[in-house]
Amino acid sequence: MSLIELVLMAISLAMDAFAVSICNGLAMRRVTVKKALTFGIYFGVFQALMPFFGYTLGVQFAGLIEAFDHWIAVVLLAFIGGKMVQSSLAKDEGAPAGEPELSLRTMLPLAIATSIDALAMGVTLAVIGADIVPAVSLIGLITLLLSSAGVYIGHRFGLRFKSKAELLGGVTLILIGVKILLQHLGILG
């Protein structure tokens, strides 16, 4: 997987966390660096851990799935991307009620929920033989940066960008899946 593909994948995976950060930034009366970094750190850490766990699972079963691994990658990427596209087209654009709470009890479920897709991506990374350390590092860093920025963007501009960000992320993942399939079939070099 090229660096550009890895960056696009990381940005795409970060879109759920980015969208949640925007929504929470919208509800904040005052945004501080600490609040923005709280979202960034929670989301970035979980976006890095989940693909690592998925990769570990994928490596365990790599020998069993070698003959059809490219199909698994395509299906997972299409599923994750399709889910993001569907979410972006949903009509539920409401802002969270009240000032967001930044406690472990609140942030942990949000971080897990926004990183579930990254678990499946980790399996995909194992299937295609990607180097996991740079991948999870980049995924975590990009998520941290986008989530922290999302709090500020949400506070400043509201929900205007939420659905567009998720739509772009979903389409990007689907296109990466199609590229993997076309490469495996020998259509692309």
Image: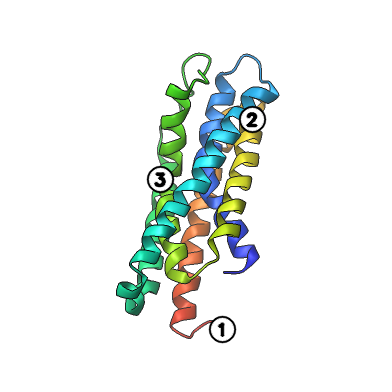
Q: Residue at x 46, y 16 (%)?
A: 97
Q: Residue pushed farthest bottom?
A: 186
| Secondary structure at numbered mark 3 | helix
Residues at circles 3 and 2 in contact by the CB criterion of under 8 Å: no
Q: Position of residue 159 (x, y in %)?
A: 55, 30
* Nearer-the-camera pick, 84 or 8: 8
Mark 2 vs mark 1, CA separation in Å: 41 Å
Res 116 label:
3
Q: Quadrant of residue 66?
A: bottom left
Residue 159 visible to an observer of this rendering = no
Q: Residues within 10 Å of mark 3 (few under 14, many from 20)?
A: some
Relative to residue 41, is residue 88 drawn left or right?
left
Of the image marks 1 and 3, the number of the one nearer the N terminus:
3
Residue 70, above or below 92? below
Res 37 label:
2
Q: Residue at x 58, y 46 (%)?
A: 140
Q: Residues within 10 Å of mark 2 (few under 14, many from 20)?
A: some
Amino acid type shown at disc 1: Gly
Mark 3 vs mark 2, CA separation in Å: 21 Å
* Nearer-the-camera pick, 159 or 44: 44
Amino acid type shown at disc 3: Ile
**Quadrant where the C terminus lies?**
bottom right
Relative to residue 129, is residue 90 drawn left or right?
left
Q: Residue at x 64, y 30 (%)?
A: 37
| Secondary structure at numbered mark 1 | loop
